[in-house]
Amino acid sequence: MPTKRTNSNRGDRIASKVQTLVAEILRDNFAEDAVLSGVSLVGAVAHGGLQFVKLFYYSRNTDVALVQKRLDDVTKMVRFELAARLSQKYVPEIKFEYDDTLERAQRIDDLLNNLHD
């Protein structure tokens, strides 16, 4: 009996699609917002049977707590707009999380550069 073939990339595809659409929504609807205009989405991961998508962001604004609060404030509005643009029966919950990869990489570079001193 043949086994049913599953597409293991579905979560990645949906997460990527959500990332792209949310980036467009932020650009289109919040371009004038001083806090959100500097936000760049750098990654996305789907969880919970595609019910949740965690969106990783980086911001030019150094006050990460302010950016996170502003993103939390607009999440419901962004999700509503996402529902209009996403061609799926269910729209996943979204959560924004700061990505500190650049700061960690800079810290590692600084440590490596200081080894010779």
Image (cartoon, grey):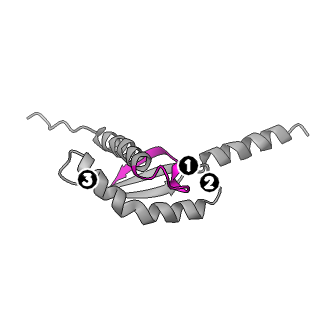
Q: Residue at x 66, y 47 (%)?
A: 104
- Kind of residue at disc 3: Ala
The stretch in magenta equals 29-47
Q: Residue at x 8, y 35 (%)?
A: 1
Could you tell which of marks 2 and 3 lies nearer the N-terminus? 2
Q: Nearer the viewer, residue 37 or 88?
A: 37
- State if disc 3 and disc 2 touch (CB < 8 Å): no
Residue 83's disc is: 3
Q: Nearer the viewer, residue 107 or 79?
A: 79
Which structural element holds mark 1? helix
- Quarter assignment of residue 102: top right
Could you tell which of marks 3 and 1 lies nearer the N-terminus? 1
* Residue 114 can be seen, yes or no: yes
- State if disc 1 and disc 3 touch (CB < 8 Å): no
Residue 38's disc is: 1
Q: Where is 20 relative to 69, above or below?
A: above
- State if disc 2 and disc 1 touch (CB < 8 Å): yes
Q: Residues within 10 Å of mark 1 (few under 14, many from 20)?
A: some
- Quarter assignment of residue 16: top left
Instruction: Find the residue positioned furthest to the right.
Output: 117
Q: Where is 21 relative to 52, above or below?
A: above
- Residue 79, how many percent across, how many down? 32, 57
Could you tell which of marks 1 and 2 lies nearer the N-terminus? 1
Q: Quick one: quadrant of the C terminus?
A: top right
- Kind of residue at disc 2: Asn
Q: Residue at x 49, y 63 (%)?
A: 70
Reading the image, the residue beneath label 2 is 61
- Residue 17, how many percent across, how many down? 33, 41
Q: Residues within 10 Å of mark 3 (few under 14, many from 20)?
A: some
- Kind of residue at disc 1: Gly
| Left or right placement of residue 79 versus residue 37 in this view | left
